[in-house]
Image (tube, rainbow, N blue to C red):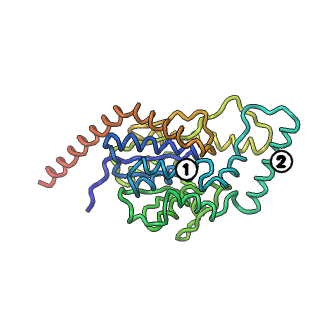
Amino acid sequence: MAAAPRFGLALSGGGARGLAHIGVLAVLQEEGLIPELIVGSSIGAVIGAAFALQPDAAVLKEAAMRVFAPGGTASSVLRRLKQNKPAAGIREGVLERIGDFAAKEYLLNLTLLRGSLLSEREVRECLSGLVPDLTFSDLRIPFAATAVDLVQGRRVILNEGSLHRAVMASSALPGLMPPVAYRGMLLADGAMLEAVPAAAARELGAETVVGVDVGSRLESPVCLRDGIDVLQRATEIMMLHLRAAGRRACDVLIEPELGPFHWTDFASVAEMIAAGARASRARLPALQNALRQGRWSSAIRRLRRRLSRG
């Protein structure tokens, strides 16, 4: 029987901002602090699965550059995502406001007619550059992805079978990507219920959980000019409060400073990786202390079990 993982890493959702996870993993690797379990939601599942398959942050960074950098394999999909990014500041010109409204209406109609902005084929092509179509048994580090079953309305932990399908399910943001059918369930973005999957890491046996939260802050002032803006703001508020529960469940929280980056800014790979590395280095003392305390607690529990049996 495998020993329980002492060090679990919980990687949050956050769209392109999740590229900062690579910087966090790079610092952990440099310090020899390789997690014994990785659990990811949404983009955290993508990055976590890729690292669990090949625990080398430098290789992962190169792969992310190939996929997301301008001219990369995902460039055509990313151009469409950019249309969802709000304009900076308030655009007062009549023509600009008409253009904004027309772009939003086009995206909304396309999503309603197709079921999602991106097709399953497009999502698969984007992800395949980071997570090949292998199984969980091919992983070098235990890994799990969280998803939400749209039928039962519950969180699901995926840690067996097709790795690629699990990552697709965990990152299937409703309206943007199609849900994934799996064993009678219809699975979508795990961050809808657990943005920072610390609780899932504990359920899988982790004694010390380090969480990485790359979620967006609420922007202020905010410009709410139509119903789509209001719906987007409501979603941001909901996600802010959902992240709070996951953050509290962590023994140590790493929070990269990603203020200027939007969740669609996949082209800013290097900048976000650097932000993740800075945040990870700043939290190293707290992380190392938590791991030391966790080892002592684990040793004491094992001693107590042996004494109780004796």
Residue drawn at 49 percent across, 59 percent down: 131
Question: Which disc, if any, is residue 191?
Answer: 1
* Kind of residue sitting beneath label 1: Ala
Residue corresponding to mark 2:
102
Question: 231 and 220: which one is in front?
Answer: 220
Q: Element under label 2? A: helix
Q: Position of residue 93 (x, y in %)?
A: 86, 33
Select label 2 or label 1 by which is in front: 2
Is 90 displayed left or right of 128 in the figure?
right
Q: Position of residue 140 (x, y in %)?
A: 35, 58
Q: Element under label 1? A: helix
* Kind of residue sitting beneath label 2: Ala
Residue drawn at 65 percent across, 33 percent down: 219
Question: 133 and 45: which one is in front?
Answer: 133
Is 94 displayed left or right of 38 in the figure?
right
Question: 128 and 195: which one is in front?
Answer: 128
Q: For the N terminus, give its image quadrant.
A: bottom left
Mark 2 and mark 1: Cα distance apart in space: 29 Å
Q: Quadrant of residue 89?
A: top right
Is disc 2 surrounded by few (<14), some (14 to 19) or many (20+) residues within 10 Å?
A: few
Residue drawn at 34 percent across, 47 percent down: 34
Q: Position of residue 188 (x, y in %)?
A: 58, 58
Question: Which disc, if any, is residue 259?
Answer: none
Quick check: 291 above or below 52?
A: above
